[in-house]
Structures are given as C-alpha cells and as structure tokens.
Image (spheres, rainbow, N blue to C red):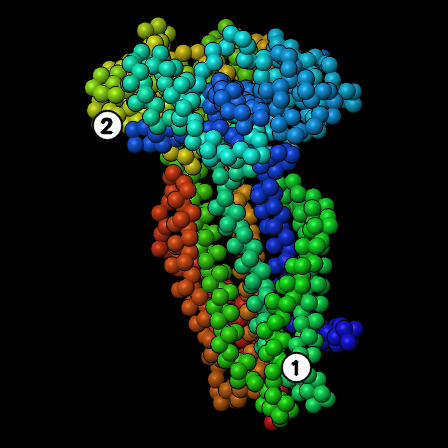
Amino acid sequence: MIRNYIKTAWRNLKHNKVFSFINVFGLSVGLSCCMFIGAYLYQELNYDTYPSQANQIYRVGIHLMGNGGATDFPMVDVAVGPGIKNAYPEVIAVTRLERDKPAFIKYNDRQFKEEELALADSNFFTVFSIPLVEGDIKTALTSPNSIVITKAFEKKYFGESPGLNKILAAGSVLYKVTGVIDKVPDNSHFHADAFISMSTEITASTRQTWSNVNFYTYLLLNKNADPKKLEASFPQLVAKYVVPEVQHDMGVSLAEAQKSVNTFVFYLQPLTAIHLHSATKYEFEANGDIHYIYIFSALALFILILACINFTNLSTASSAKRSKEIGIRKVLGSEKDKLVWQFLTESVMLTLLAMLFALGFVYLLLPYFNNLAGKNISMDFFLNYRAIAFEIILTLLVGVIAGIYPAFFLSSFKILSVLKGSGSVKSVSKGTLRSGLIVFQFTISTALIIATFIVFQQLHYMQNVKLGYDKNQVLVLHETYSLGTGIESFKQELLHKNDVVNATISSNVPGSNIMTGTEVYAKDIADKGPRSEIQIGIFNIDDTYIPTLGMKILKGRNFYAGSLADSSSIIINEAAVQSLGWGNSDPIGKIIIRSGEHRYTVVGLVKDFHYTSAKQKIGPLMLMYGPDNGSIMVKIKTADVHGLITDIKKQWDSYNTGLPFSYSFLDDQFAQLYSSEEHVGAIFTTFSVIAVIIACLGLFGLAAFMIRQRVKEIGIRKVLGASPQTITMMLSKEFLLLVVIAALIAFPITWYAMDKWLQSFAYRINIQWWVFALAGIIAVVIAFVTISFQAIKAALANPVKSLRSE
C-alpha cells in the first residue's frame, strides 16, 4: 500500500510540473533559510557552554546607582574574587581575566602587532576547560612573565617548530612560552591569541582593593550552591571591605562612607547568560542580544509558514484539476482515510525533495552566509547525526502541516458533484480560508518591509549621529610610545606639513574604549550633605586634543600648552556635571576630589561627545592634562591621502623606533563599533527579501490557477468589448484588496514591535508615518506586478481559443 502511495504521488508530481516546481522551490528556499537561521541561533544560544562545569560558573559584577543613573560593570577590583572565595566555602575556585594593551611581539626576525592579548590567573584554563596541547595546564601560568599562546600564534612566530619554552620579546619585556592551546572556542564571550600570567601584573606589593573595577572575575560554585543566596550575602562583604576602603580614600566618617556605598551592589551573572544578556560598554568584547534571537526565531518561523501556506493555497486552488480523479477513486471503493494518506504522502515526498534541494542551497550559499553573519559555520554542522535527525523531523512536520488541510479538503469532495463537473469551483475561487492565508502572508511581508526600513534607519542614525567631534579625515598613528622623548618633536614636524591641520598626542581615541576610570565626588555637594561618589571615565590628553577633533568648549577654557599648573586642572563633559549633582550651575572653578587625596579644579566644560558607541548613553568623563603617548591623531586636509601617508611613514622610519609604521582612520575605527549591528541588519534584510519572494511566488501560482479557471469568462468579456486594461484590473483587484487589508493589519503590530526594539538603544530614531505608507505601497506594487504577469497574459489572449469548445 505504501509503495502504491509513493508511485501515485510521484506520477502526480511529474504530471503537475508547474505546481510541483513552485512548491518544491518555495519549500526548499524556506527550509534552507530556516536551516541558516537555525545554525545562527544555535551558535548564539550555545555561547560559553564548552566548560565542563559551565552551569556552575558565574561572573561577578558591580551595579552602581547614583545621581539619577545606574551603571553596570562586568568587572570588579583585584581583591574581590579571592575575598569571596575565602568567605564562602561553596566557592570552589575563582579565576580572573584582564584585557592587555596591544603590543609588538618579536621572535628573532619575526615581529607582529598583537591586538588580542590578555592576562589570566594560573587556574584559568582549568576552570574554563580549555586543554593545553603543549605544556602543563596546572603550572603554565604560575610564574611571572609566562605566556600561553594559541596554535595559530605559535605557527606565526615559530613555523612548524614547537613554541614551548621559547622566549618572546615585547620591547624590553621577555615572556617564556609555557603552554599552547588549540584556540579559544568560537562560542566564547572572550577571545585572545595569547594569555600572560596574572602574576606578571599582580605581585606581593599590589594593594588588595575592593572598590574599583578592572578584572573580569569568575566563580566556580559547587553543585549544591544557591547563587541567589550567595548574592544576597554580598552586602556583608561591602560593609566589611568596601566601606572602610572608601572611608580611608575619602577621609570621611564611617557613617558617611556607608551612605556613599549604599548603592554599591555586587551581583552574579551565569556564564551562559553573558553573551545574550550583558551588553555594557565594558564587556571584554561585543556580545549578542537576546532580542535578535527572538526576532530571527520569528523570522525563521514566518518564512516556513509562508512556504507551507503556498502549498496549502496551491493545492486547494488546483483541486478542480483532480476532482474527477478523486471521484473515480471513490467510485472504485477508495475510502476517505486512504485518500488522506495518499495526499499526505504526496506532500511529504514533495517536502523531502525540497529538503534535498535545501541542503544543496546550504552547501552553495554557506560561504556567503558566513560572510553576511560574521560566523564560521561549516557544512559538517548540517550533516552530523543530530542535524540529520532534526532535518528528517522537520521534513515530516512541514510535509504534514502543509498537506493536512489539502488532504482533508480534496478527500471530502462529493462523488456526484465532481463527476457531473460542478467540482467545488466556486468554493475554490472564493474560499475564505485561502483569502485569509493570503492576508496572513502579506501581513508578514509588509511587516518585514517596515521592520527592514526601521532597522536600517536606526543603524544609519547611530553611524551618523552628531558625535560631538569630527571623525572625518583624522589619521590615527599607533604605537607612538616607541618614539620615546622624540614624540613631541615628531608631532611638531607633522604640524609643519601643509596637508596637516592639527595633531594631538593621546591613547584615548574616541570609539576605542581605551580609557581608565575612577571614583570621584564633588566637594561643594559633599560639604552640604552625604558624600556621593560617582564612577567617571578619564581621558589623558594634551592641549591640542580638543581643537584637533573639533570639540566644543561650552564654558571655561582649554588647557594651556606646557602648563605645570594644569596638572591639577580638569575639563569635564555635560554628563559629569549632571552626575556630580551640579545641575544647571556653572561648574568652572568647582573642586572634584578623587580617592580622598587628589583635588582637581574644573577649568572647562566640553559638550558631550560619544567616546563609546551610540548604543550606550554618554557617561561622565573628565579630561586630564598629562602624558598618554600611545597614539597621535592627525587632522588632515588633502586629496592625496596616499602621498601624505607615504611622507609620514618616511618621517617615522627616520626615528628608528624598531616598530613598523601603523595607522588607521578614525571613521573606520568608529564604523567597527557597529559591525555586529551591520551583520544583524544584513541578515534581517536578506531573509526579509526572501520571505517576500516566497509570498509572491505563492501569489503568482495562485493567480495562475484562478485566472485559468476564469478563461472563458475573460473570453466572453473580450468579445463584448472589454479592454485588456479593464480585464487586468478586474483580475487583480480581488488580490490587491487582500494585500491592502494585510498592510492595515501589519501597521499597528509592526509599530508596537519595533518601538519595543528601539527601546534597547540609548539614542534612537522616532518612527515616522511615511515608513508605513511606503511599505504599504511597496507591498501593493509587488503584489500587482506578481499578479499582472498572469492577468495581462490572459487579457491579451485570443478569445476564440478560449471559447471554441462552447
């Protein structure tokens, strides 16, 4: 019986080639899209699951409230992790990670700039279950100046020779290779090419403080530990360690110190939740976003539903062609349940064929998808036993869902009606279900068009928001610390070039996240009541920083060149004024106190500027006058940029720094802040377009069937004088009305969903009415073009051919 079902199904698929092609192509595109999105979602949802005890690892962070704002820091101070472990027996281990600055690493005649360096505790690889392929995992990071590298790092410096026990140089500092790992897993929230022992930085003389932030700290808890209960006991540690430390630093009473840290809260975050649920501006690297998981899950589901709807619509629309077959089968004794199984078999076979094509599409398009999504997914991902099992289940599920209604619909035809030729044509052409499905398809399509517009508007807004500085034609020269005492003369030589407008020395390049921070409080506010500390960022700059970047000083002055007095002067931004509690008062001349020892006088107020991504709210910042010679930013004005760079390179080489000339452009660096959003936008747009194409494909096939059923009506109308334009509009208006209804349904739903999405951005666009109008027009035009191909073809046909059988 099953073999008979399959033979009959195959014969029907071959007999209805157009119907079969539209369904196979639509389903295969839908299935391949779902497989791509599914692979993306699988990787995103499985971040940090590789440690053997991943569910027992938690990261410690600080939540700070103050002056109407809240800030989360995913890092804590040097003593916090060891202190928690000593205080609570349920903490099995603690390990710390710290990002290190980029450096040039050298071995013999091979020298490369390494951007991805980190410091880690000796038990780091044990806690995170990252095995060493060379060296001892227990001792590799025990000694100062020891370094563990990846296989790629090893090959770059040592070729095919083992790197273990060899010496690498970073300037005058020597590192001994004590271990080699394959690589940090792709699904990790941190990545580095080399890990330096934490004992290189933290020595016996390091002050064990609690109230600052710098170290990503992870706790390994025992299986029976309750993280919520542990977290609830952290205020005891704040009272024991943080309050006395703040009291000492601020020089205040114990009661005042307690008030100042009332909003200082340590919290625990599960390791597996970091990638999708933590998006502070202080992350080790850019994380994902759980909202995109919801969006892409819905997108995959919608695409699959659209493909299934196509099958349902086309199957019911073509029922008239098979009505006599069904009637004859019933006369010959075929029961309804057997007819249902016959049609379900056809549906599953067609879906199986679509799945095979979908795997072919995946194989061909995977490199493009990886480039689009910024992922590194291999074909093996789709061919392992779990994936194959999922693909088989998906095929059966889609086959049954897509075919269940047509199976029952076709098998329920009355014998006498179909054999007399009356068929159910009226119900087929005017079916409420089919109209509802068309409305559903174009509701999704219109919603996706609107969402695509809004996504790109938001991305464009972030990339072109008024930054508070001019990022255009700013050349950033790297590793300028290697110029030593010659850095100022190098800068002066730059200023003498005709194509150079200005230049400034500072490592604090906007958008680079290279900055330090500290706790400060406003003296005049503290004199009137409890002292409230705030976390504030620090940029160390020279007197040409502000004019080079075109920043605006609102009040006060810039630093004086070479002024020793300005070593205790600061310039702050507007956000700092508000955070310090000064409101609308003039900040010039006011005093800020740092760590109870350093007093700074505010000499200038600079307009807020985006020193990090526009995704985050601008935080308080103070600009300090002092050396920070890691970079030189050069404002240029020339059409011959290549010639100027060549000239600057010659100047660099003349200083014999021992390091190669390295540069970038500030606008390119700024664009990198939004690389993840760019990938998400590209994925969303691509699959939204595919979803619209699938909907149009179904509409195209449906229009062809409906027009074919009305061919004699069209012939009569033409004989009676109807013009091709009139017939085209007559055939199109029914479908276009459904598309208009779909657009009206999509408008409020999409507005609500996209407004919720925009709430996750500190700076965002306002949704404009014209986006909805334009999307509705596009949906109607797409539908009209899709339908009109068949409608015009029918309208231009010779009526004699359609009426000659009458």
Closer-to-camera residue (529/634): 529
Badge 2 amino acid = Gly
| Residue occupying image coordinates x 51% and y 24% | 88
* Image coordinates for residue 587, horizontal then vertical, percent: 25, 20
Gap in Å between the C-alphas at discs 1 and 2?
A: 79 Å
Seen in the picture, residue 326 relative to 42 is either above or below; the reply is below
Task: Locate residue 390, reporting x and y percent.
Answer: 67, 54
Label 2 secondary element: loop
* Quadrant showing the C terminus: bottom right
Along the polypeptide, which appears first: circle 1 or circle 2? 1
Q: Position of residue 328 (x, y in %)?
A: 70, 88
Which residue does the numbered mark 1 point to in the structure image?
Answer: 336
Amino acid on which disc 1 is placed:
Lys
Secondary structure of the residue carrying numbered label 1:
helix
Residue named by callout 2 = 583
Relative to 429, residue 188 above or below: above
On-image quarter of the N terminus: bottom right
